[in-house]
Image (cartoon, grey):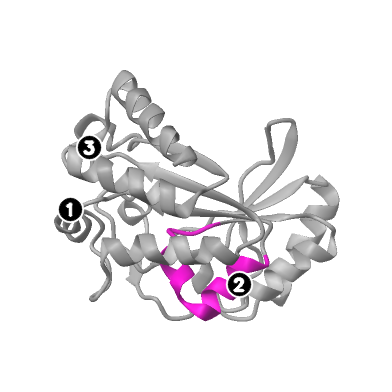
Amino acid sequence: MMESFFYKDPYEENGKTILELNLFPGKYCNFNCIFCPVSRKLPHQQTQDPVNVGNLDAAILDLQQKIRAVKPDLVFINSLGEALLLMGLEKVIHTIHKENVPVRLLSNGYLYGNQKYAALAGICEEVIGELKMGREEAFQKAQRPLAGYTVRQHIENMAEFRKSYPGRFHLEITVVRGYSDDSASLSVFRDAVAAIKPDVLQVVTPEAPFDKALGLPQDRLEAIAGELQKSLGA
């Protein structure tokens, strides 16, 4: 039995109070990225199957009480790994909605191509999808996905989901030095932005402790971000 989920201190974002929580006691993900800070700290289970962490009743009651105490404008489900894998996620989302609070869900986006997981994401007011690689070789080497995954399918899964998703779609592109900062990768990113048509586009680079080896200088990152923003109008 889980007594509680794991919370960050409430914080402000654009004048709104955000309550951010992680659902998992460990890392469960369909990727195993070489630059994932979570994998350096916690055991990692690579899977795309639903994950049972036990009875959630106590944790859900605690969540309800935290929402009533904090009175957030939005609850952000930002789990270690892939939040869509949690068995009982639908109940978590409904609990938040019963308190009349919208939900933002972080996912790497690959499972938006799975009908069951897409349905779960579809009941959230905001979702995030991630894209870190543009070339297949780099995708396999750096993100180490489950067998059969491809970068093309990753993009298609998010683009198809976006067509019917009525909420606010955030696309986060991570540009990684030596892996996805080349012209071929950036071209794929431009096409992905045009296909997905996110409401919000965020372009980032790896942070500490990976920034020294894999991060881009700020001026280079800003130049790439400017170019990718142009694809929103394509």
**Mark 3 vs mark 1, CA separation in Å:** 11 Å
The residue that label 2 is drawn on is 120
Please state which amino acid type lies under the numbered disc 3.
Answer: Asp
Question: Quadrant of the rendered structure where residue 190 is?
Answer: top left
The residue that label 3 is drawn on is 181
How far from the left and from the top, in percent, is residue 87? Answer: 57, 79
Lower sequence index among marks 1 and 2: 2
The region drawn magenta spans 106-123
Q: Residue at x 33, y 50 (%)?
A: 36
The quadrant of the rendering that contains the C terminus is: top left
Relative to residue 160, is residue 149 drawn left or right? left
Lower sequence index among marks 3 and 1: 1
Q: Nearer the viewer, residue 223 or 191?
A: 191
Lower sequence index among marks 3 and 2: 2
Q: Is residue 204 magenta?
A: no
Question: Quadrant of the rendered structure where residue 62 is?
Answer: bottom right
Q: Residue at x 16, y 57 (%)?
A: 141
* Mark 2, secondary structure of its residue: helix
